Image (tube, rainbow, N blue to C red):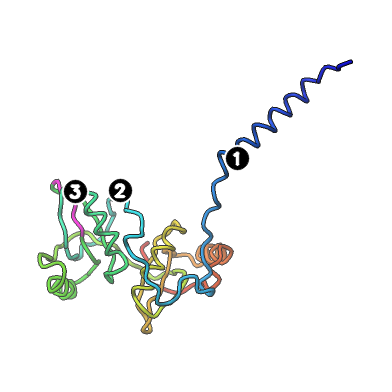
Amino acid sequence: MSFPIPISILIAAVLLIASELDRKFFPEEPPALVAPDTAAAVLPADTIIAEAALPPPVPIAPIEEQAETLGFRVQIFSSENQASAQALRERLKFILPYDIHISYKDDNWKVRVGDFTDKEPAQRFCDELKAGEFPDAWVVQCPMNRFVDGFRIQLASMRTHNSAASYARLIEKEISLPVYLVKADNAWKIRVGDFINENNAISLRDELIAMGYSDAWITPDKVKP
């Protein structure tokens, strides 16, 4: 004599089979990369990551700066092509020693470097660029970022610029904060954030340590308000 199978058991069996098929043909996404522990030398001090291995930059429209003072920057590029301007900024971001800015004016995307309060140091830097890759570089007066005393979080210190730049690019993919490369004490420091309030910096430092950046520490720096 056969007994009818309760509907609840049939439903459970169907769901179980569907779940097994889903795991077989649609495996779970791999977990997100965990930020490396700098002390563990995940990326050795002299390792260089080829730029070709990095994903292409995604063009984005720049946000208009709200500056209170005029200063000087060195213009190195101008084009109607936004993607070209953004790609140049991405390539040079951790190579040139100053911030790189993109602005849109007169139907062109302009790439400018630095935030100089005086024209003389801007001109010296411009002359260096003209002697190298950017013979058409020139100094322009424009609104500039203001910097004030504050705090940043240092994540690593490396001997060579190439190693630090490569590591900074990896960190930038993991942390949704500005990443800076600073040369000090004959080494290249990788720092993140712009904090006026030290308590905010402390909170982020603790989060970064929990992520695996065990050497994270707070250092005074000039920051963007």
The kind of residue tagged 1 is Lys
Quadrant of res 138: bottom left
Seen as rendered, the residue at the extreme left is: 136
Residue closer to the observer: 128 or 163: 163
Residue closer to the observer: 186 or 167: 167
Q: Which residue is mark 3?
A: 81
Residue closer to the observer: 168 or 143: 168
Q: Earlier in the sequence, mark 3 or mark 2?
A: 2
- Secondary structure predominantly adopted by residues drawn in magenta: strand
Quadrant of res 214: bottom right
Inter-mark Cα distance, 2 to 1: 38 Å
Nearer to us: label 2 or label 1: 1
The quarter of the picture where the C terminus appears is bottom left
Q: Earlier in the sequence, mark 1 or mark 3?
A: 1
Reply yes or no: does residue 108 show up in magenta.
Answer: yes
Nearer to us: label 3 or label 2: 3
Crowding around mark 2 (Cα neighbors within 10 Å: few <14, some 14 to 19, many 20+) is few
Q: Which mark is residue 24?
A: 1
Q: Which residue is mark 2?
A: 60
